[in-house]
Amino acid sequence: MVPPDSKVPHSVESSAPVVRWSIVTRFDSADSCKQAVTALKNGDKLAAVRLDRLQFFIRRFLRNQSSDPDPERARARVDAAICIATDDPRFKEK
């Protein structure tokens, strides 16, 4: 998941409640998600794409990141990305 964009230039709202974050893709396991997020944060796009069967969605995310007119905000999105279980209680926050 990635946080919503901030009104502050070149940044995201990483302190926003999880219910406002965007789901980028889903993984079969927490380990697969963590490996993909680590690879993205390290700039290893090819490793991130190979890590999970949902390659289409990861490629789409990377393509969206590279086409963002604000590359600093795109980087902030990747840096703030997290893995979260679908049953996490934070999804119920209002």
Image: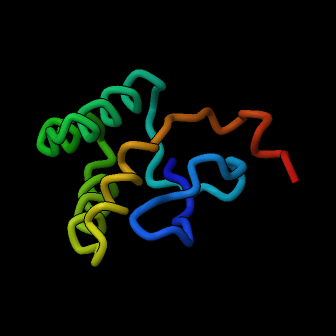
Q: Quadrant of residue 32?
A: top left
Left or right: residue 81 versus residue 45 is: right
Q: How is the image coloured?
A: rainbow
Q: Position of residue 8 (x, y in %)?
A: 52, 68
- Residue at the (28%, 64%) spot, across then down: 65
> Going by the picture, which residue comes out furthest to the right?
94
The vertical placement of 79 against 30, above or below, is below
- Residue 46 position by quadrant: top left
Say which quarter of the image contains residue 81. Answer: top left
Number of numbered markers: 0
Q: Relative to 8, is 16 above or below?
A: above
Q: Position of residue 7 (x, y in %)?
A: 56, 72
x 40%, y 21%: residue: 31
Q: Residue at left 64%, top 47%?
A: 15
Q: In the image as oriented, which residue stretches furthest toward the top? A: 31
The relative height of residue 32 versus residue 13 in the rendered view (above or below) is above
| Viewer-side residue, 31 vs 40 | 40
User: What residue occupies the far front of the structure in this picture?
Assistant: 8
The quadrant of the image that shows the C terminus is bottom right
User: Residue 17: x, y in percent?
Assistant: 72, 49
Residue 70 vertical placement versus 43 (above, below) = below
Q: Residue at x 37, y 62 (%)?
A: 73
Q: Going by the image, does 16 lie left or right of 74? A: right
> Which is more toward the observer, 45 or 8?
8
